[in-house]
Amino acid sequence: MEKAKIIFFGTPDFALKSLELINSHCDILCVVTSQDKKSGRGLRIHQSEVKKFSITNNILIKQPEDLKNIDFINQIKSMNADLFIVVAFRKIPKEVYSIPKLGTINLHASLLPDYRGAAPINWALINNEKVTGVTTFFINEKIDHGDIISKKEVLIDNDDDYKSLYRKLSIIGSNLLLETIMIVFKGKFQIISQSKVNNKKKAPKLNSENTRINWEDNTDRILGMIRGLSPSPGSWTILRNGDNEVRMKIIKANFYRNNLLDKKNLGKLSIVGNNIYINTKGGQINCTIVQIENKKEMSAKDLLNGYQIHENSYVY
């Protein structure tokens, strides 16, 4: 049976599951991934997991700085791929996505048109969605607006955070992507246009401003933000501790009801035993894992063993 000839574009771990599965069923002519980065102490060169897999499996690798570079475009044109597949990669220019005869397919970690944008997994959790999913679609000139080929719903568990949901969607997404490749290669598929669909649920890129906790928000929203940004980049706040102020990330927390709470003091800390409670509109949250600026992530108990939190401390 003839195999689909694929050029694969992707870099992070999320793309690796798809690459592994596609490689076992298709003919991958080339992998296009981001350039190696220097990171950590000593600024050692770091290769993406996608690149490491490609080296191990003797797959040709391209790492162009500019996707519009004419030499790069001519090289991938000459490979005569049936499809380009894109998973968690930067914006693909028309000069590239228009090359393959069957089109360029993207895997997106939401149920499009909801949560178009750079951080769909995070925002689904921040907004306390009960269901999310994955979508395959043909890339066009507008980001995440191309014709939809297939979708798969995924339930969000109460204890899911960004890390667990990321892992779950990468596995389910890889299977949906392979199914999509097969039906497109055989010409047995239908598309759903997004041209006249506007979505109210967006997934903008995360930054310092939109990852800061607003203690005026309701408790569910605050807990959703903590889940959606855990473990990285982490939801953050400023801790006013005595005369000092320090940035603090809350990595994990749960709801703790206290009917005797003075609800006017939003953000006030209460230390009870080895627990750190923070006042919210709905009661209190119990912060179980936190990270003080320039310190390691640690449990509330471990933090309190070596870090004094003064009476009347609060966050804002």
Image (spheres, rainbow, N blue to C red):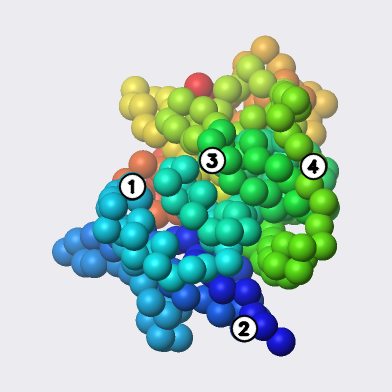
Tags 2 and 4 touching, CB below 8 Å: no
Mark 1 falls on what kind of element? loop
Task: Identify the amino acid type marked 2.
Answer: Ser
* Residue under pointer 3: 118
Tell which circle, 4 or 1, labels the residue nearer the N-terminal end: 1
Residue 268, label in figure: none
Foreground: disc 2 or disc 4: 4
* Residue under pointer 2: 24
Tags 3 and 4 touching, CB below 8 Å: no
Residue 87 lies, in percent from the top left, at: 55, 57
Residue 192, label in figure: 4
Spatial separation of the CA atoms under disc 2 and disc 1: 30 Å
Spatial separation of the CA atoms under disc 3 and disc 4: 22 Å
Foreground: disc 3 or disc 2: 2
Residue 33 visible? The answer is: yes
Task: Identify the amino acid type marked 4.
Answer: Ile
Spatial separation of the CA atoms under disc 2 and disc 4: 29 Å
The reply, left or right, for residue 74 in relation to residue 135 is left
Mark 3 falls on what kind of element? loop
Dot 3, how many residues are within 10 Å of its Cα: few (below 14), some (14-19), or many (20+)? some
* Residue under pointer 1: 68
